[in-house]
Image: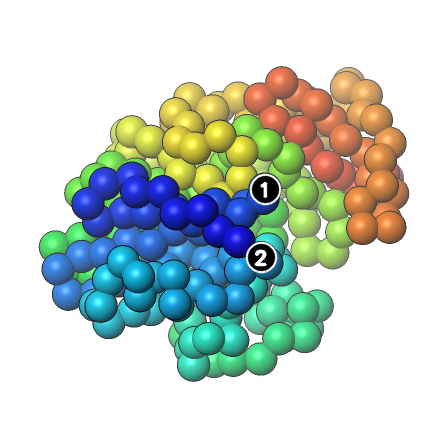
Amino acid sequence: MSERKQIDSQTWSFEEEGVRFFLLTGTERALLIDSGMQTHNARELAREVTDLPLSLLNTHADPDHIGSNREFDEFYMHPSECVNFYGKQKRSGKIVPVWDREVIDLGDRILRVIAMPGHTPGSIALLDERNRRLFSGDPVQDGRIFMFGEGREMHAYIHSMERLRNLSDSFDEIYPSHGSCPIRPAVISQLIDAAEEILSGDVCGVEEEMFGQPVCAYDMGVAVFLCDREIFKRY
């Protein structure tokens, strides 16, 4: 069950336990950013708010972001997520590719795609230029950032975050899929410092189990990074 929260007259969040997705409207179109985890009626929920032509964009293809994808004949996604969506998640549907710096125009509301590889190869964020908001998916948050398992890569994550920091004059607030919402751009530098400290090997983690897989949890204050136990042996 999702709880709907109105952010402004053209923006809503849908809050599940531990994850959220968003609905944005312009003058001509509406866009869902992700489609939930246990939610399987995101289209119906959006229709309670708007009757504008509706599209779906996935920030990436982890299962907590694609719960209602079956409701849509097609959806925007970065092609690097195909290995996750079709392979690991065994899902079907038509991906409409979106690329770094591509623009999605909802009508007087421009959304710009920002590629964010690291958490997954095809992770993306969306910059709402007029409203100076960043919808960040999973990489930018103050909760628990999954960096374990196939497809996760800490160096790529740091490079993506450094690039995002260079763009931070373009937004005032960040709307992530997990953790507190909204958060301030200052968290980006804090996450970079935390990730670099983990890679340095100078900080100790705590062993946990996630989905039957052993991981190492690093509570860095700004967020908790969940990493492969063998992270340092890979580099």
Residue at (83%, 26%) from the top-left corner?
Answer: 206
Residue drawn 24% across the image and 37% down it: 132
Q: Is residue 54 above or below residue 4?
A: below
Name above or below for residue 154 compared with residue 61: above
Residue 100 visible at all: no
Give the image location of residue 203, x and y in percent.
77, 19
| Marking on residue 18 | 1
Residue 62 visible in the shown view: yes
Of residues 147 and 50, the one drawn nearer to the viewer in this rendering:
50
Q: Quadrant of residue 61?
A: bottom right
Which residue is drawn at the image coordinates 55% and 29% (left, top)?
142
* Distance from the alpha carbon under mark 2 to that under mark 1: 9 Å
Q: Is residue 119 left or right of residue 212?
A: left
Q: Position of residue 150 (x, y in %)?
A: 74, 56
Residue 154, horizontal then vertical, whole percent: 66, 40
Disc 1, SS: loop
x then y, percent, for residue 214: 87, 43
106 left or right of 178 in image: left
In percent of the image, x 61 and y 27: which residue is there?
Answer: 223
Q: Are marks 2 and 1 in contact (CB under 8 Å)?
A: yes
70 or 138, nearer to the observer:
70
Q: Disc 2 residue type?
A: Met
Question: What type is the residue that disc 1 sits on?
Answer: Gly
Judging by the rendered image, the residue that carries numbered circle 2 is: 37
